[in-house]
Image (cartoon, grey):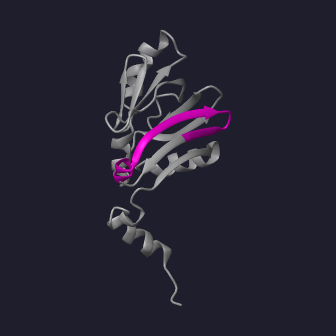
Amino acid sequence: MPEINLLDLFQRLRGSGFRDFSGARVTAHVPISEALLNELLAASIPPNAPVRGVSIRPDAGNHFSVRVVPKAALLPAITLKLAVERQPELPSTPVLVLRMVTLGGLFGLASGAITGLLPPGVTLQGERIFVDLHTIAAQRGAAEAFEYLSALQVATEPGRLVLHVDAGVR
């Protein structure tokens, strides 16, 4: 029996839009450790980004902290405490909305510096950060995943980001 190269098989299935799995549905609960989350985040920061580093610490109750270390020596590191305010609504609105829960009045002073550190697909409006998941996926060559997603929810628990995913092949 000939060996099957799984990567080649996956690429062939992907090229066909997974038609051999037509009608398949998958619902998944995907916990991602803080360590893996930060490893993936570090690997995705382009060399020309205005930040030296970004780390995320998931907390309980859909809250987390994001620490941003700018490249500019004059700017201090900023730690933002965020809460998930609104989940993406797929397929129409693949945007996760986060709300600042700390910094209060100081946020107005820091927002200019923060805006300059945000990657494409992430925008700041008042105390809300809008994360366009489709735009971010497209920048990383993964936009086609949204062709299969019908629901995506982001939750947190101490030390873990948890994705609730519903996907299928038409």
Residue displayed at 32% across by 66% down? 16
Q: Find the residue positioned furthest to the front.
A: 23
In depth, the one of 142 and 93 nearer the eye is 93
* Residue 63 at x, y percent in the picture: 58, 26
In depth, the one of 73 and 68 nearer the eye is 68
Q: Find the residue positioned furthest to the right.
A: 158
Residue displayed at 45% across by 48% down? 167
Based on the picture, tell me whether residue 148 belongs to the magenta stretch. yes
Quadrant in which the C terminus appears = bottom left
Based on the picture, tell me whether residue 120 belongs to the magenta stretch. no
Q: Horizontally, is 98 left or right of 139 in the view?
A: right
Q: Horizontally, is 31 left or right of 117 in the view?
A: right
Q: Find the residue positioned furthest to the bottom.
A: 1
In depth, the one of 159 and 47 nearer the eye is 159
* Residue 113 at x, y percent in the picture: 40, 25
Image: magenta residue range: 144-163
Prevailing secondary structure class for the magenta stretch in the rendered image: strand
* Residue 138 at x, y percent in the picture: 33, 49
Residue displayed at 52% across by 85% down? 3
In depth, the one of 148 and 120 nearer the eye is 148
The tally of labels here is 0
Instruction: From this view, report whether residue 70 is shown above or below residue 21.
Output: above
Q: Find the residue positioned furthest to the top.
A: 105
Q: Quadrant of residue 120?
A: top left
* Residue 58 at x, y percent in the picture: 61, 33
